[in-house]
Image (cartoon, rainbow, N blue to C red):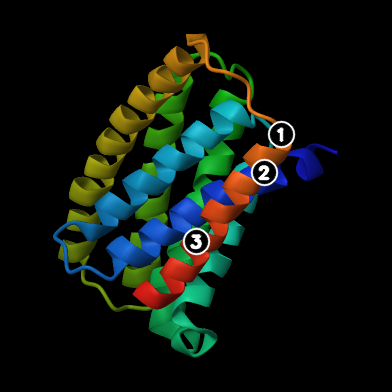
Amino acid sequence: MFLKRNLLLIVFVSSLIGFSETWIGSMDLPFRSVVLSSITLTLLALARSYLPKTGTSLLIVIVAILFKVNSYGIQSYCTASAILCGPTALLLLGMGFEIFAFLFIDKNPFKSLNYVLCCIGAALFVFITFGLMNTFILKSWDTSRLQEYILLKGSLTAIASSILSLGGWYLLKYIKTLSFPRLHPYFMNVLLGSVVLSLWICGYYIA
């Protein structure tokens, strides 16, 4: 019942993550991994504040991975490098966030500090795990790059995602206090569905 009631919202957040991964991921930006990871963790945190149920964050990331596969095409993911740098990194973000959301958010979803701790823990978990995989399993990185990736990029992601998620958490809390006219659920479903469809189409052509 929970999944059926919130499926469209889950797909909506997944599409936002997938679109940002596709759009920003196609740009040649410095610290691109920091930007992408911070956006993903922030969206996961905001979604978890509205859907405080174990497993929802991982489900959101899995759908976001499908978005990326749809955008780039399955043939683009037939190399070891593409599989590691794309879906695997995103899956690690979902797993890391799920672990720390269970430890902090699920026990008290109404405390803003818990979202900060979750983002910090998830960011460090992901960057440490991903860096170790590249250095000691695939042996494609040296130790100097590993240190930069964890100490610099991991720390920046932890700080940025914490600030963004905290700001978003308070913004959502403030919006809930405003008196907006209630929209019909059918209209909201059509609106969200249209946005989701547009994101998937745009993501396909951007890639």
Q: Secondary structure beneath disc 2?
A: helix
Q: Using the image, tell me which numbered label, if any, was put on residue 81.
A: none
Instruction: State the separation of the CA atoms marked 1 and 2.
Output: 6 Å
Neighbour tally class for label 3: few under 14, some 14-19, many 20 plus, Cα within 10 Å: few
Query: What residue sits 55% from the left and 25% below the top?
Result: 104
Does residue 159 appear anywhere in the picture? yes
The x, y position of residue 168, in whole percent, is: 38, 27
Q: Position of residue 11 (x, y in %)?
A: 61, 52
Q: Which mark is residue 189?
A: 2
Q: Are marks 1 and 2 in contact (CB under 8 Å)?
A: yes
Q: Give the vertical position of 155 relative to 116 (above or below).
A: below
Q: Is residue 110 left or right of residue 59?
A: left
- Circles 3 and 1 in contact, beta carbons < 8 Å: no
Left or right of residue 202, residue 50 in this image = right
> Is residue 1 shown above or below 175?
below
Q: Residue at x 38, y 44 (%)?
A: 123
Are there few (<14), some (14-19), or many (20+) residues within 10 Å of tag 1? few
Q: Which mark is residue 198?
A: 3
Task: Give how far apart the Cα atoms at labels 2 and 3 are.
Answer: 14 Å
In the picture, which quadrant includes the N terminus? top right
Q: Residue type at mark 1?
A: Pro
